[in-house]
Each structure stands twice: as C-alpha cells, then as structure tokens.
Image (cartoon, rainbow, N blue to C red):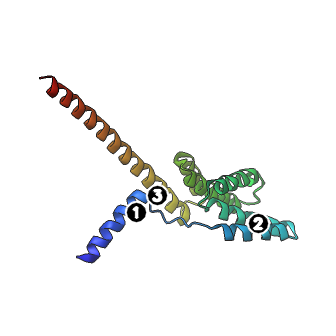
Amino acid sequence: MEAKMGRFFESVGSFFTGGDNIPWCDRDIIAGCERELADAATEEQRNDSLMRLSWALVHSRQMDDVNRGISMLEASLDNSGSPLETREKLYLLAVGHYRNGDYSKSRQLAERCLQIQPDWRQAISLKKAIEDKIAKDGLIGIGIATTAVGLLVGGIAAAVARKK
C-alpha cells in the first residue's frame, strides 16, 4: 500500500513539475566547456568544444545560459558540415526552446531532426515530452478557466441571494 501511495504522489509531482527525462547541466560543467573552448588549438577542436558548450548551455537551469546556447547554435547552423551535425544542432536548439517554454518552436525543430533521421530515439523522446507538456499546459489552462467561471457564477449567485 505504501509503495502504491509513493508511486501515486511521484506521478502527481511529476505532472506538476513537468517530469521530463532531459538532463540538466550545472555551472561547473559550463565553465569547464568554456575553458576547453578557450584552449582549443585546431579548428576541429574548436568546433567540438563549441558543440559541447552549446549542449551544456541549452541543458542549463539558467535562462541566460539557455538563450546563449540557442544563439550560438543558430549562428553555427548554416556552417554544419554534414546532415549528422545539422541534426545534432537542430536537436540542441529544440532542447533550448523546450527549456524556454517555446514548445511550438521546439516541436518544429524536433520534427526537422526526425526528417533527417526518422528513428532517432532522442528526438522521438523529446517530441513526446513536448507534446506531453503542451497537453498538460492545456489541461491546467482548462482547470483555471473552469475555476474562474465557477467563482464568477458562485459570486453572482451569492449576490442574488443577498438581494432577496
């Protein structure tokens, strides 16, 4: 019984916190990636370091970092050397926009990833997280609207009852 209750509260908590499986990144990792980029000796090392830094930034809990990662990726998207690199950048952009709450842009980018590689599990998982978040936000919005209407109707009924 206790285990069932624990799972119930975990699922409720995950509903309200947006329990996705997308990892987070902390400032220490970002700082390490920035040092690695500064120390890059060749163009190939620089490109690899930029991708790692972009990954770390869009997975950050700080919106300034996420926005910086999005800007870096958008600036480098046209310079992608292969479809695989383009796919990776599109995916990271989708993660960044997901973190920012721009779910429609995130879904569009995840779909572009899936056009390049239809069976890519990460993009499929991200697209599902986006759709779940959109559905959840819609349910919460409906709940808020219903509550507001209920309060309004209750207030009107109370006012009418007082006048009689």
Q: Secondary structure at mark 1?
A: helix
Callout 3: few (<14), some (14-19), or many (20+) C-alpha neighbours within 10 Å?
Answer: some
Secondary structure under tag 3 reads helix
Instruction: Judge left or right: residue 22 versus residue 148.
Output: right
Which residue position holds label 3? Answer: 128
In the image, is residue 150 above or below residue 38? Answer: above
Q: Is residue 120 visible?
A: no
Q: Nearer the viewer, mark 3 or mark 2?
A: 2
Q: Residue furthest left?
A: 164
| Residue extending furthest toward the right | 41
The x and y percentages for residue 136 are 39, 51
The label shown at residue 55 is: none
Measured Cα–Cα span from mark 1 to mark 2: 33 Å
Q: Which mark is residue 14?
A: 1
Where residue 83 sits, quadrant-wise, is: bottom right
Do callouts 3 and 2 mark residues in contact (Cβ within 8 Å)? no
Q: Is residue 154 left or right of residue 80?
A: left
Question: Badges 1 and 2: C-beta atoms under 8 Å apart?
Answer: no
Find numbered disc 2 in the image and state the secondary structure of the residue it sits on. helix
Instruction: Sort mark 2 into few (<14), some (14-19) or many (20+) by Cα contacts within 10 Å.
Output: some
Q: Give the amino acid at mark 1.
A: Ser
Residue type pointed to by label 3: Lys
